[in-house]
Image (spheres, rainbow, N blue to C red):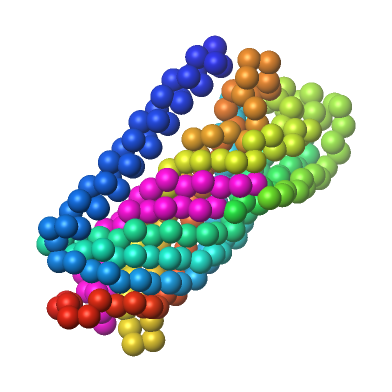
Amino acid sequence: MVNVQWSMFNEKTYRFFIYILIMFTSVSVRAQVGDHRSDFIIGVNGGYVLNRVSFDPTVKKKWHGGSSFGVILRYTCEKYFSAICSLQGEINYARLGWTEDIETSTDTYSRDLDYIQMPLLARLAWGRELRGAQFFFQLGPQVGYYIGGKDHRGGEWSDATLALRPNRVTAQYDLPVQRKFEYGLTGGLGVEISSKIGRFAVEGRYYFALSDIFRNGKGDAFGRSANGAIYIKAAYLFDVIRTKGVERK
């Protein structure tokens, strides 16, 4: 049953990435007919992450909080009617993980999962390019690599309390991360303000992992164990290269 579900899930994964490829190709083609730009912007970002790991069989959880920070590289290729079209790449550190909601005893458990993440985003923005505000939407694939983690346990932690776990699911406690490489889809909405001293942005973003942190074969403990994260991010950016001879509004 797990293998059938995973085959169906992989098919959805391929469809997601085909969609993203089409979207990137569309942006590139439109760059040939819009108002051309060749702007390059760099910056830094930081924020807070709320993550949950989706388990099958189910493990009851709360949101797990962590930090995120990194660097941003953005290339703006055109202004197509009112939409400013860009490609944005990032290299980020993020602390993901899960916190269990254990109601049957005084036991507590959470695990930190530290990742290096690299999203590649198609970005569309509307508003002022300089000296003003713009609203933006961005979407694209993301890959990540697990670099370490830590367990946090509290309470009695005896055979008796473990036997009271919902569904008697306890395999996650002794399993190391078996699949360090992960991939998924991420997207967000935000506002960016351009000023004389640089660009300031705030964004809300969601990441949906299409891969699992544990093996999911027929004899394995879990058929699904994937990250799903909400990011609240702030960024500071500045222009490195700005196309000359272009009218900007």
Q: Quadrant of residue 131?
A: bottom left
Tell me if I can see residue 186 in this picture.
Answer: yes
Q: Position of residue 225 (x, y in %)?
A: 59, 32
Is residue 202 a member of the stretch shown in magenta? no
Q: Main secondary structure of the magenta part?
A: strand
Tell me the residue at 54%/64% (across/down). Answer: 70
Quadrant (top left/top right/bottom left/bottom right) for the C terminus: bottom left
Say left or right for 162 vs 85.
right
Asked if residue 200 lies left or right of residue 19, the reply is right
Specify whether 20 is left or right of 154.
Answer: left
Q: Residue 130 colored magenta?
A: yes
Residue 50 higher or lower than 34, as above or below: above
Magenta part of the chain: 117-146
Residue at the image point whose x is 87% and y is 32% from the top = 158
Residue 168 percent across, percent down from the top left: 72, 22
| Residue occupying the point 55% across, 59% down | 92
Residue 53, horizontal then vertical, whole percent:
58, 38
